Amino acid sequence: MVCLRITDLRPAVDPLVGTVTRDRLGVGLTPADGAALEHALRIADAWSGRVVVVCVGPESVEPVLRDVVALGVSVVRVPLGDEGDGHRYVAELVEDERALARTLVAAIAPFGRPDLVLCGDRSADRGTGAVPAYLAHELGASQALGLVSVVAESALDGAPWTLLVERRLDGGWRERLRVSLPAVCSVEGAGVRLRRASLSGALAATDPTPAAGSTGTTSAAVASAANPITAGPGSIHVGPTRPFTPRTRILAAPADPDPRVRLLELTGALVAHDPPTVLHPADASEAADLLLAFLSRHGYMDEIPGATRPSPVDGDVEIDGDGQAR
Amino acid sequence: MPEQIEFDAVVVGAGPAGASAALALARAGRSVVLVERGPFPGSKNVYGGVVYGRVLDDIVPNWWEEVPVERWVVRRSTMMMTGTQSLSVDFRSQAWGSAPYNGMTTLRCHFDAWLAGKATDAGARLVTSTVATGLIRDSAGRVVGVRTDRDGAELRAPVVIACDGVNSFLAKEAGLLPRAEASHHTLGVKEVLDLPPGAINERFGVQDHEGVDMEILGCTRGIPGGGFLYTNADTVSIGVVVSLPELAASGVRPEALIADLKAHPTIAPLLAGSTLREYGAHLIPEGGYDTMPVLAADGLLIAGDAGAMTLAAGLWLEGVNFAIGSGYAAGRAVDRALSKGDCTAKGLASYRADLEGQFVLADHKRLRKAPSLVLSERVQQRYPGLICDLAEGMFTVTNPTPKAGALALTRQVAARHGVKLRQLAGDTLRGLRIFG
Amino acid sequence: MSAVMPGAGKWDGISFAQRMATVDFRIGARAHIAVDSDICRSCTTKACVSACPANLFAPTADGGILFNYEECFECGTCYMVCNSEGAITWTYPDGGHGVVFHHG
Ligand SMILES: Cc1cc2nc3c(=O)[nH]c(=O)nc-3n(C[C@H](O)[C@H](O)[C@H](O)COP(=O)(O)OP(=O)(O)OC[C@H]3O[C@@H](n4cnc5c(N)ncnc54)[C@H](O)[C@@H]3O)c2cc1C
Ligand code: SF4
Ligand code: SF4
């Protein structure tokens, strides 16, 4: 199952009161939701499973859903009570992520309990990223959030299916986890892009027979539902390890008795700053050298891979120091 | 070999031309697919802002009851300006403010989607987010379908209608349009500015739902072209349209021309306090009748801007109505050709005849010389100043010096602008012949 | 008319970047326009630089052109004004990508 939050990708936020205004022409999939769907399609291929997409949203999201249906997956849309006003549609649900998670779980109940739920890490319009956590709670599943890659591991005979996932940590580090099912994973909009539907898929999705009906169930072309995935005990295997903590720099607290002076010292308001350095490197490698030199001059470079490296950990978690910056 | 999906006709481009063509075919009971490269119809399209609705009367009866409209145009103003002067001819008709209406401001994302919706309601299939990348021909060179940028299949049909707009790569591929002819094109740049409806009503002297259409000459630093200003419900659209080669040669940035126009003493107060909502740009085929391509080939028709059908001659900036008229005619011509079983250029020839008989080509033919007159050096660079100075001379009170006679004044002012009276009279006559 | 100000400066108090930020671009993975900087080096007009309404053509110190495809209106101005055959390879972005006008 993939949960998509289709909304205006460039909502306008009032700088004064924080009201979010959504434009129905701006609706689309965030890169994160697109990545979630792409991961789901790949995993479903590997497991011969099927993908059900569920989305809570008003009628205005149907064009986007039609593009999703074109990929040959089943789509469930849970309509929102008042569809009249396109601008403030999900206001209430966004406020209450728990209710949203329950709604999503209820919506896919007819399809059976999902083995894997994938979501984008957060929605574009003020999302907090809490929905996947609530979903995991509702489903009693394990959770792994904010991932950059999700790969289905080929199961040895009889062994339960697992996923090998990777998540970004501070300082260019990566954390690799093995997740067993059922699980809820949320992914960043990085690494993969959603594939485009074939022409025949796109045409089938325009079939005038109701696309995503008002009760919300559509199944355009349902991929083979042959393989019900046997779920292992729901947990993320984590071996003995210590959390990754970037070193803290300790600064002395300002000592001056005058609060104003202390405040100035803390904020650095009156301190003269170096003007920005503008360089015109001739090519990319020179630019990289200049950047590295700058970083080491300012004391950022001792954390570079190889210099001081947290000792490798045993178990299923590996902290990778290759600093694959994207 | 990719899968072949068969239709009676493939229409490329869900702008007004394509939607109308698909509508005509779907109504005739033909299976038709409408291919659009944007995520929804209208998403790639920018225009000035007024659609003239007469052409819709026969196609969607009582269209005004359902069309997405911003304001009904009741005031049309043609303005000549210099840096510090302006002279407008301002026409207002309340008759335009009630059914059956003359023109309306509307935005393309709404209007194009509405018209394409008419076509899908009638049974046409709309595939969005899909680019038609090329024509498929049979061994005899006849067009029999299009390839798209989606995998796995191609669209086949006895006829393709290319409604893919000004850059029409399909018409170019078919050899009907030259690859790049800058001199027949103008660039339009537009800003949409937020302005509260109350302020629009007050500043433009209209009621709710009533709008204004302003065409402006002399605001483009001598680059052949003009400006426009249209009122929407809670925004105004302002922009300039300038000849491509001359814009390029001038080295002036297009948005700088809009900034000039917005800063003009006549325009600035109308826009005070507004903020930019969206900036955009689009080309216009502006050569008129004499530069129109051949409109039919074996298995192919072209309609709308793909066939250079915008009427853009200073006083007019109309293209949507021409696109609808030509698209609908193309759809009907294809239906007739399919019934006859002859989709060669000859079988499709009734299209051209139909267009000659109605406003689409009749207007273009009548105004064929207009582009060269309106974009000529004298009209662009000298007349706005000349006319403004003339008005200033007439209306400035000079006592105790007696008023100059009109003819003397004209001679004086014309000389100041380097125009001979003979030329002035000649151009007036030319103008009367073309426009009158 | 007001003084001629070359280049893409600040008009009405908004920068060019702010101007472009008003537009919805759904950026595709493929660069739909490619500019052959080697050809541009011998170009005398550099017409694309001032005419492109999105100001995407940046002249480089060595006489070439640096081009970014992301914030493009897909208008066609550049290939029409370009005087050197082959300098610009121009296609539409993949379906669904590229500019999306909300107030066209
Ligand atoms: C600045 C400006 C101001 C204007 N002002 C006015 C005005 O006030 N009133 C008026 O009536 N007219 C005006 N026009 C003219 C008017 O916009 C056009 O004449 C009209 O849009 C033409 O319609 P069309 O359907 O032929 O082409 P378009 O509206 O350009 O539609 C073409 C469609 O085809 C799609 N397409 C293109 N290639 C492909 C492909 N390969 N595959 C799939 N889809 C493709 C495009 O995405 C687009 O949706 C103005 C134009 C401009 C630029
Ligand atoms: S793109 Fe064309 S106009 Fe621009 S610099 Fe290159 S050759 Fe010259
Ligand atoms: S198509 Fe238009 S906006 Fe895009 S690069 Fe060319 S001139 Fe600039």
Image: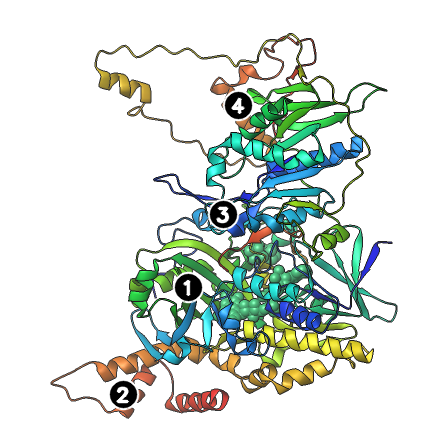
Say if residue B93 shows up in the picture: no
Say which residue label 4 marks: A293
Q: Element under label 1? A: loop
Q: Element under label 3? A: loop
Chain name for mark 2: B
Say which residue label 1 marks: B232
Q: Position of residue B419 (x, y in %)?
A: 38, 84
Q: Quadrant of residue B271?
A: bottom left
Query: Alpha carbon of mark 4 to alpha carbon of mark 3: how far?
Result: 57 Å
Q: Quadrant of residue A117?
A: top right
Ligand 3, by image quadrant, is: bottom right
| Mark 4 lies within 8 Å of ligand 2 (Cβ measured) | no
Q: Are marks 3 and 1 in contact (CB under 8 Å)?
A: no
Residue type (three-letter) at the residue carrying disc 2: Leu
Q: Select label 1 or label 2 by which is in front.
A: 1
Chain name for mark 1: B
Q: Select label 1 or label 4 by which is in front.
A: 1
Where A269 falls versus C29 (above or below)? above
Say if residue A49 shows up in the picture: yes
Chain name for mark 3: A
Say which residue label 2 marks: B409
Going by the image, does A150 lie left or right of B285?
right
Q: Element under label 4? A: helix
